[in-house]
Image (spheres, rainbow, N blue to C red):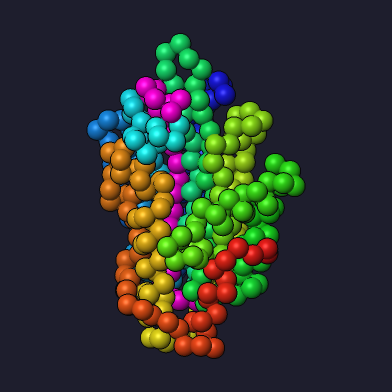
Amino acid sequence: MAEPSDHLSAIETYLTGLQDRICDSIEVLDGRERFKEDVWTRAEGGGGRTRILANGDVFEQAGIGFSRVSGSALPPSASQHRPELAGRSWTALGVSLVFHPLNPYVPTTHMNVRFFEASAEGMQPVWWFGGGFDLTPYYPFDEDIRHWHDVAREVCQPLGDTAYPRYKKWCDEYFFLRHRNETRGVGGLFYDDLHEGGFERCFAFMQGVGDGFMKAYAPIVERRKATPYTEREREFQLYRRGRYVEFNLVYDRGTLFGLQSGGRAESILMSLPPRVRYEYGYQPEPGSAESRLIEYLKPKDW
């Protein structure tokens, strides 16, 4: 794991280009609003650019951020899991996005691709890639979910036949609300600590995941964005968005790492929905369209 230090600029070039390409695609899908950019710096080291599209025809809020940050010591949430990194300086680069559509028939989605490196004088650097993408529908359609997983399977193929089942299972297990006994959505891919096979192989996989995201998501948006809906569907969407808030604030390691490492809170919390509601003891009407969702919130082969 000693080779990638000289490749940080190549990773940054890819990630900023990825952010640009996804923003262009989302603006075309939305058809009305454009992203506004917020460039920021971090006192301890690094910075980034956060882009938000709000109140569009298709997207109530679409947030996508690039960051390259560094520090002299890891926060407790990271060093507890990786004690061998204690005392090392570190650099982390990534693109992360969460899109919250207005129409309840268009799923919310999340994607993240990232690279982490820790180094110390006289020691070999420790590095790895991580990321993935997942889908959170409110009114699920099997053809949409199959398409999503077909792309995920295709993205994983360069790593061999075992990669998709492994990373699909990891996604199901990671995006799981234990206190609700349900998955956050219908899954996708999640991987971390990827370094086997060398830097070039792992970097190529990151690019495959990043480039595959819009191939997976855009057709679903096109298919569902004009679906008529009523206030009932909208209220259900707002209620289910509460689960997104619960996961991100209770379980998500990236949110915890960002806040504990002195990250920019506004950028870290852009994943939260712009509108959400909570209702005590809510139960969907048996046999209703809303009651179907619970059948999809458990791991399933697609």
Which residue sits at x=41%, y=46%? 254
Rendering coords of residue 146 (x, y %): 66, 66
Dividing the picture into quarters, in which one does residue 85 lie? Answer: top left
Residue at 68 percent of width and 60 percent of height: 150
Q: Is residue 158 left or right of residue 295?
A: right
Quadrant containing the C terminus in the rendered view: bottom right
Q: Which residues are magenta?
A: 83-105
Q: Compared to 79, does 181 lie above or below?
A: below
Provide residue 12's location: percent of width, then percent of height: 46, 35
* Residue 9 x, y percent position in the rendering: 47, 29
In the shown orientation, is residue 198 left or right of residue 285? right
Q: Is residue 300 left or right of residue 161?
A: left
Q: Residue at horizontal 45%, vertical 45%?
A: 95
Q: Is residue 164 above or below residue 238?
A: above
Which of 99/54 is in front? 99
Query: Compared with residue 20, is residue 10 higher up or lower down, i.e. above or below?
Result: above
Q: Toward which corner of the image does residue 168 lie, by quadrant?
A: bottom right
**Frontmost residue, 15 versus 263:** 263
